[in-house]
Image (tube, rainbow, N blue to C red):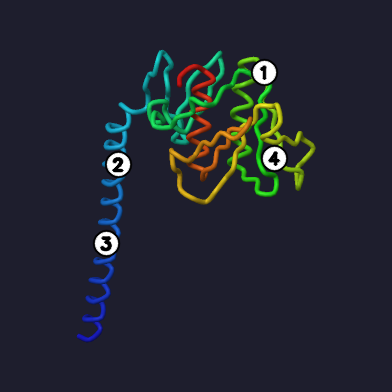
């Protein structure tokens, strides 16, 4: 009788484990199906949009992409998401614009955004020249200063949160963009929109 009780107990445990595993499999399958339909139904309407004749598509990274002069250009934000950022003071009339940073405090996000602006300037027959604001740790690129005769956009990464009223400062011939990564990405997107005529 004792042997039979042990066998019954083991059978019940096996049966409980089997039900538990079946429950997990069914609930995870249901969650997958639910997530698939909810995600597809709610985001399909938001994967494409149009702004002033430009078609924007949501890319796999969560950013936006549009075609400009036959090239796919990527953005973090749509133009209307940046309406509260005022960059009217930035004039990009010169053929050569220096895109400066502090080499002692360089961040990948700044270098990436400098490349983005340089690329768009090049598509518009202008030169975006990476440069340093001071000589310390500067690679073999020009060193510029705000008091010089050249137009300079200076990217200054700070740890404080994005503040649309303090992100852009004009000083002599410099436009100083001071913000965290989010703010620098927003202002860079807005600058690119300005260059291509969408801001």
* Of the image marks 2 and 3, the number of the one nearer the N terminus: 3
Q: Nearer the viewer, mark 2 or mark 3?
A: 2
* Of the image marks 4 and 3, the number of the one nearer the N terminus: 3
CB atoms of marks 3 and 1 within 8 Å: no
Q: Nearer the viewer, mark 4 or mark 3?
A: 4
The answer to whether residue 103 is above or below residue 85 is below
Q: Dot 1, how many residues are within 10 Å of its Cα: few (below 14), some (14-19), or many (20+)? A: few
Q: Nearer the viewer, mark 1 or mark 2?
A: 1
User: Residue 98 versus residue 193: which sits nearer the camera?
Assistant: 98
CB atoms of marks 4 and 3 within 8 Å: no
Where, quadrant-wise, is the N terminus in this rendering?
bottom left
Residue identified by numbered label 1: 95
Image disc number at residue 35:
2
**How far, Cα to Cα, is label 3 from label 1?**
69 Å
**How far, Cα to Cα, is label 2 from label 3?**
22 Å
**How far, Cα to Cα, is label 1 from label 4?**
20 Å
Q: Dot 2, how many residues are within 10 Å of its Cα: few (below 14), some (14-19), or many (20+)? A: few
Residue identified by numbered label 4: 133
């Amino acid at each position: 009788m004792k042997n039979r009780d042990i066998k019954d107990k083991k059978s019940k445990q096996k049966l409980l484990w089997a039900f538990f595993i079946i429950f997990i499999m069914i609930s995870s399958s249901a969650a997958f199906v639910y997530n698939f339909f909810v995600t597809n139904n709610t985001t399909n309407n938001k994967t494409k949009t149009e702004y002033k004749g430009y078609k924007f598509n949501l890319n796999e990274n969560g950013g936006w992409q549009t075609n400009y002069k036959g090239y796919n250009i990527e953005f973090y934000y749509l133009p209307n998401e940046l309406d509260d950022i005022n960059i009217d003071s930035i004039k990009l009339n010169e053929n050569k614009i220096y895109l400066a940073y502090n080499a002692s405090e360089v961040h990948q996000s700044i270098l990436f955004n400098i490349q983005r602006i340089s690329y768009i300037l090049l598509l518009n027959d202008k030169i975006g020249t990476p440069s340093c604001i001071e000589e310390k740790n500067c690679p073999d690129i020009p060193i510029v200063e705000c008091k010089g005769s050249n137009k300079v956009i200076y990217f200054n990464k700070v740890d404080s949160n994005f503040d649309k009223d303090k992100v852009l400062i004009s000083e002599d011939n410099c436009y100083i963009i001071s913000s965290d990564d989010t703010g620098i990405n927003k202002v860079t997107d807005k600058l690119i929109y300005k260059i291509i005529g969408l801001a």
